[in-house]
Image (cartoon, helix red, strand yellow):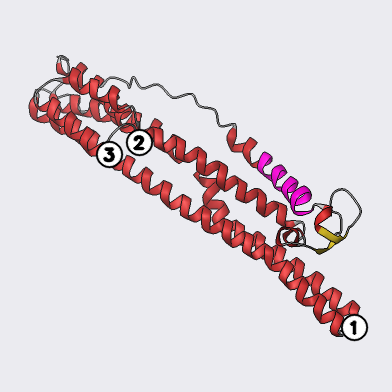
Amino acid sequence: MAEIKPTATASVKATSVQPKKSSNAISWIAPIICLIAGYGIWRFIFGNPDGFDVKGTGWFWPKHDKPKGALNGIYMGGIIVPILVGMFLMVVVFSIERYLTIRRALGNGSISDFIRKIQYHLANRNVDAALSECDKQRGSVGNVMKAGLRRYKEMINEGGLNTEQKVISIQKEVEEATALELPMLQKNLVFLSTITSVGTLIALLGTVMGMIRSFSALGDEGGGGAGASALAIGISEALYNTALGIGTSAIALVMYNIFTTKIDSITYGIDESGFTLTQSFASLYK
């Protein structure tokens, strides 16, 4: 009976990569704080009573009138304004958070230079020097490469597997490490992408509400000169919502595209590092 050759997936060691522990508290704490801060800015800065000739009463939404300055005019945009201000603050907070995370993930130096150094050390069969380069890089590509190099080093002296199985083991280790790195890079980008589309819709809602109030005031005035003046003022106040929403969405879109471009470069580096490891092992340790 012909000898049965073991399949490529048999006896492959399980991955040694451990899941990273990370807190995601900012994902639900930051939006709440930003919305509260947005209300505070709208109520106490834009709605400072000293900025109006006619001061309203009440605590949550005083009906001030005749604003003295542009910031006070924003207050007249209505209750949707604090939501838009809160969303703008979210864009700022999550942009800073993503910048710091992705900057750390990029590591030290150029990713392409780092991969070339790894290729050089592997070509000279110096795995320890390659591992040392990973410690210097200290980014996501370095972390994935380090996990793969550890398995690479184990497979050099592994006698129970053929070359194909060893390559698959290294590839699996790289895939497991990659699966743990990428979610960290993409986390919280959903807030920027959501604000990009929802910000304009919420602004439109605020504008429509302001227009309803304006035309209602025109009807109360009977359509005379005073009514037309009130309508013009009301429309200008309603359009503050549109301006805030479009501005916030535009900034969110720009930041989202910047971060996704950076993540794509890291992902490409990770893919190239995995290819480097498997091809190097397959050619040097047949």
Q: Is residue 39 magenta?
A: yes
Disc 3 target residue: 269
Region of the chain picked out in magenta, as a range: 32-47
Secondary structure of the residue carrying numbered label 3: helix
Disc 1 target residue: 222
Disc 2 target residue: 106
Classify 250 as above or below 228. Answer: above
Give the mark nearest the N terminus, 2 or 1. Answer: 2
Left or right: where does residue 102 sit relative to residue 42? left
Pinpoint residue 19: horizontal percent, then vertical percent.
43, 24
Pinpoint residue 127: horizontal percent, then vertical percent.
17, 20
For the stretch drawn in magenta, what is the main secondary structure? Answer: helix
Q: CA distance from mark 3 to mark 2?
A: 10 Å
Classify 129 as above or below 70. Answer: above
The quadrant the C terminus occupies is top left
Instruction: Give the crowd class for mark 1: few <14, some 14-19, many >=20 residues within 10 Å.
Output: few
Left or right: where does residue 226 sit relative to residue 195? right
The answer to whether residue 69 of the structure is visible from this angle is yes
158 or 140: nearer the viewer: 140
Instruction: Give the crowd class for mark 3: few <14, some 14-19, many >=20 residues within 10 Å.
Output: many
